[in-house]
Amino acid sequence: MGSNLTFVIHNYTTIINIHMGNPYSKERRKMAERNKVELYLKDVFERECVYKIEREEVEFIQTGIETIVQRIANKVLDNDTLQESMKIKFAKYFKGKLIRSPINIFGVGSFYEETRNNFPDEFDFILTLFCCEGTFEEYKQFLLEASVFNTVADTFSQKVKELSELDKDALLYTAPDPKCARKLYFDKYLRQHGPATWLRFIYESKSKRKKEIDVDYVAALHITDRNVLNQIVNESCVLTEFAQETLSVGSCFCIGANFSLTQTEVHIMRNVLSEKHRQIYRILKYLINGHGDVEKLDNLGNFDKPYSSYMIKTVMIYHHFNCKTFDTVNFGPCILDVLGDLCRYKNTSEFPSLYKLDYRTKIRCDLCLLTFLRTLTDSLRSMQRLLGSSYDYERDKVKESISKKYLDTLGK
Ligand SMILES: [Zn+2]
């Protein structure tokens, strides 16, 4: 699960990642003329990161996915047998009431953080089964016996599979305007991965071009009690700013063996980070992992770890709260700062986390892309010393992501 203001599904806030004319001032162009790295990073952002489709197409996909995901959620939550069997499991741990929350679908992950690159083809949702009137101690005891949640996740996943495949016709979304030929529909259940259920959707454009869209669906308990939240924040958050933002969001989740502050992550990436820092994060994701190169690396099942988007995001959030650059225009100084931070860690146990480790075990793995990351940092640093006058994107670009370069050395 990627990371989470949790975003309320009915609030169809438009995500405008489409390049709208030239947002750069004269001053910026003048700076860029003198500095190659600025021209290059601006190009990486515009060519590789922004969505290549129209804003109304993004809106169609978002509305379609949210509509169908809510229909599936309703089917799951309206299922009395499932509700009862889950209630029995939770009631053992919580003395207070188990309430069905009025809002039960929360959009999280890169789409809702407004940091997804290239195409909106991956959506993450949290489905809250119940809101429990529990104490902090009750929640902690519940987390210690994470196996309870594993059985809940298994049951949930099986139910989603069964109910979504039962009546596929109901899981189709078309535009309100009958002349619009676009459609979006549920295709199949892919698999369960830890607490997450993966579903595949198909988007068909006006020109009948089909595109797969994956949805990651996680069952959770919703925690809204102020006292419980205060205690979770005190026990979990490393950064004061992160703790404050969690309290301003006003709720969090309990997923698997952890409290999840993924709503806070969405809120910070979307509303707290500066536009420049958000763009830098997207550029870094592309330079390090390309479009999907890191997934290929993950699929090899090697013990050594590449840099996940989540790890880059963590370092980016630390950078944002400690950034000493008051320059709001140039990318170079901040991106080199973040890369400098990333290059300091040799293994996962040295790597910073937003959370104290109470509920997490940390396995020490070497970071296998470190050498490549240092080379990338050096090449951007040397670009920063060059004039932009002789710059050419196709000729000067870094040809492959560092994940891809590493894959090449493995002969994959
Ligand atoms: Zn900065």
Image (cartoon, helix red, strand yellow):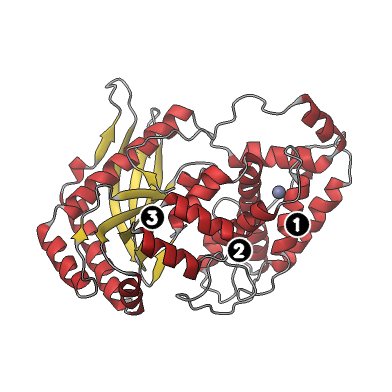
Does any atom of ligand 1 lie closer than 8 Å to the CB of label 3? Answer: no
Residue 373 image position (x, y, % from top left): 72, 62
Residue 376 is tagged as 1
Closer mark to the observer between disc 1 and disc 3: 3
Crowdedness of circle 3 by 10 Å Cα count: few (<14), some, many (20+)? many
213 relative position to 129: left or right: right
Comes first in the chain, label 1 or label 3: 3
Query: What amino acid is labelled 1 in the image?
Result: Leu
Taking the spot 53% from the left edge, 37% from the top edge, the residue there is 51
Query: What amino acid is labelled 2 in the image?
Result: Tyr
* Residue 116 seen anywhere in this rendered image of the structure: no
Image height of 14 relative to 333, above or below: above
Marks 3/2: CA–CA distance: 29 Å
* Residue 232 seen anywhere in this rendered image of the structure: yes
Residue 351 image position (x, y, % from top left): 63, 70
- According to the picture, the residue beneath numbered tag 3 turns out to be 251
* Viewer-nearest residue: 137 or 174: 137
Residue farthest to the left, as pictured: 81
